[in-house]
Image: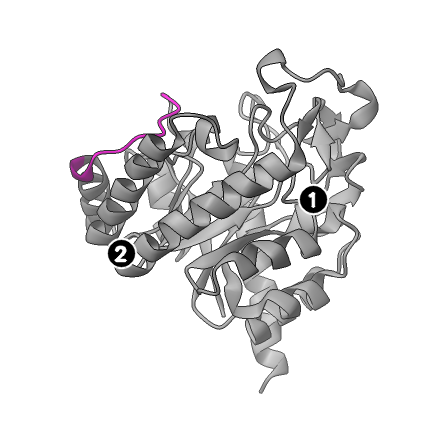
Amino acid sequence: MVSPALILPPKPDERWKLSTQMGVKKAVIHPLEIGDGRTHWTYDELQGLDNWLTNAGLEFAVLEGSVPISDRIRLGRPGRDEDIEVFKRFLRDCGEVGIPVVCYDWMAGVRWARTAVHVESRGGSYVTEFDLAKVGSDPQSEFADVTHEDVWEALEYFLNEVIPVAEEAGVKLGLHPDDPPRRSLGGMPRIVNSVDAYDRVLEVTDSKYNGITFCQGNFAAMGVDIPETIEHFGDRITFIHFRDIDGDADQFVESWHDEGPTDMLAAMRAYEKYVQDDVPMRPDHVPTMAGEDNSNPGYHTNGRLFAIGYMRGLREQVHADNY
């Protein structure tokens, strides 16, 4: 089963109120809502944030992206062992606080990439776009010698080191796909870009704490059947990004949640049937709507409110179908 969640800023504002007014209790803390781009947290900072959320009637459900994983870790460079020890301490702190899920990625150098953020969509709203033809191909000089197997070795090494700690701490990890899910971007090898790649990741350590962030738009860009893929991964899905795209990994635009090519009701049926635990699902990469300045493309408020209503309506239809 799934539960609606929202990205919320780390300090209370009207979005905290909007969330509780809509009955959405699960909070996702994300770097795009943290003004300083933080990746390191002390125990006191995590506990203080959890206290604030609890007092507001919210649950600290996921810490996403804003986690201490350096490119030294992602690429297996000297110093990774020291950095991994920092991440282990972070996991233990999350466990002490009671944060159940940490979402991370394995995109070194270039993170999630878009080539346009003012693409006009329904009613004059704006969505984002990726077009490979507009992306340079030269790798950054410091990464010019990196191979795909280097990146695989680094990820497997990391998982073997940290999953036992995650198990002890009671914190599930959810690996986010490469965005876009290509074999390389800007000359940098990428590996988390297919169902086969995720199968390899999950085989590294067969633990429910070694899980998947099922970012639906990225799986759509892989060209897979979404409901079948949800069934394939089942209870290894620890976190869900509910979104859709029109196109493929080489060229796509984000779509409104209710008018993309994916059958979203079929996807919701699959989540409710095959995802075993109470997994947070948040709307992702929403359109920028009237009155919003598009200063934070994909992450303004109005589109999130629309998407939450749409998600809840789909889920209610699935529940009604089962009676």
Residue 109 picture location, percent across and down? 57, 23
Residue drawn at (57%, 28%) of the image:
111
Question: Does dot 1 land on a helix, a strand or a loop?
Answer: loop
Residue 43 picture location, percent across and down? 19, 39
**Amino acid at dot 2:** Ala
Q: 306 and 208: which one is in front?
A: 208
Circle number at residue 169: 2
What number of labels is visible? 2
Please give the range of residues in magenta.
36-44
**Amino acid at dot 1:** Trp
Circle number at residue 256: 1
Q: Is residue 129 left or right of residue 151?
A: right
Say if the magenta span includes residue 244: no
Tell me if residue 108 comes above or below residue 232 in the rendering.
Answer: above
Q: Nearer the viewer, mark 2 or mark 1?
A: 2
Residue drawn at (50%, 34%) of the image:
74
Say if the magenta span includes residue 41: yes
Q: Is residue 53 left or right of residue 114?
A: left
Tell me where residue 107 sits by quadrant.
top right
Tell me if residue 244 comes above or below residue 151 in the rendering.
Answer: below
Mark 2 and mark 1 residues within 8 Å of each other at the beta carbon: no
Tell me if residue 281 comes above or below residue 236 in the rendering.
Answer: above
